[in-house]
Image: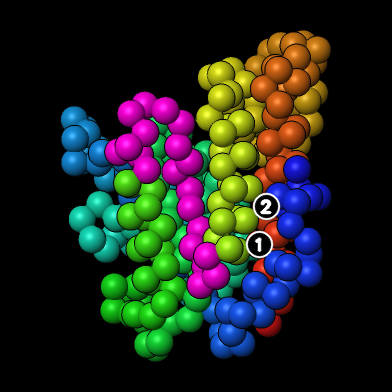
Amino acid sequence: MEKDLLFLSRIRIESLVMEMGEHMKYCVITLDLVNSRQLPDREKVQKKFKEVLKLINQKYAGVIKVPFDFTLGDEVQGVLASLKDSYPLIRDFQRIFQTYPFYAGVGYGEILTRLSGRSGEMDGPAFHLARASIERLKEGYIRSHGRFVPLVRYTFQSPELTSIVNNYIQMVELLKFKLTDKQREVYWLLFETGTYREIAERLKQSKSAITQKIQAGYVEEIRAGEDGLIQLLEWIERKEM
């Protein structure tokens, strides 16, 4: 999956990236809990979200230009200098905040104002693209009527590049969505332990039982797809430098 880039040639993607311009690009990430205003324990969830923000801001301090913080209502926003680190960061949010689904809208482009301590005081195409991502996600979720829709979306200045990346994300996120609770537990533990044996010891199960869950849930395929996505984002970013 990660090798074909949805059957489009490397040359074509490179031409799309070149069309995006040569100015410094930033990655704006906007997060918003699904149906946050309808949560019965909204105050408790917001408190938990603040704790998660603190962890994320610490872990990714090296690439975060503007720390993640609340902006509009329940929305959270931050600015990264690195596009390739955006998906691992979103995945960490997913891991730590598993109980409540959230939208993750990403925009990659220029920032026209000076960098500030708060993203709400800044403006530029990167913010507009992130807003477009969030709005598209919310529209898709409303129209889904319970069917699967990805809750992660990237928007670039190039519509075709946007389509390539989001088709890739849809495949990866669909496989993650289909994981059972036990398969999902093993999927996340792989990031902590790195080996089947350590997971088996942690869960007090046989290694063969862990292997069976991993194979049934296509966990290794998910990880390979995620690695391919991160490599694609890194490649896009490298062409921008």
197 vs 217, nearest the viewer: 217
The x and y percentages for residue 98 are: 45, 34
**Which residue position is annotated with label 2?**
229
**x 53%, y 19%: residue:** 181
**Which residue position is annotated with label 1?**
233
**x 37%, y 33%: residue:** 144
Quadrant containing the C terminus in the rendered view: bottom right
Q: Is residue 209 left or right of residue 81?
A: right
Mark 1 → mark 2, Cα distance in angstroms = 6 Å
The three-letter amino acid code for the residue at tag 2 is Leu
The three-letter amino acid code for the residue at tag 1 is Leu
- Magenta residues (range): 140-159
The x and y percentages for residue 197 are: 80, 23
- Which SS class for mark 2? helix
**x 55%, y 46%: residue:** 91
Quadrant containing the N terminus in the rendered view: top right
Residue 216 location, quadrant? top right
Residue 80 appears in the figure = no
Q: Is residue 148 magenta?
A: yes
- Location of residue 183 with respect to 226 vertically, above or below: above
Q: Is residue 202 left or right of residue 135?
A: right
Q: Residues within 10 Å of mark 1 (few under 14, many from 20)?
A: some
- Location of residue 79 with respect to 232 vertically, above or below: below
Residue 202 location, quadrant? top right
The x and y percentages for residue 191 are: 67, 39
Q: Is there CB contact under 8 Å for labels 1 and 2?
A: yes
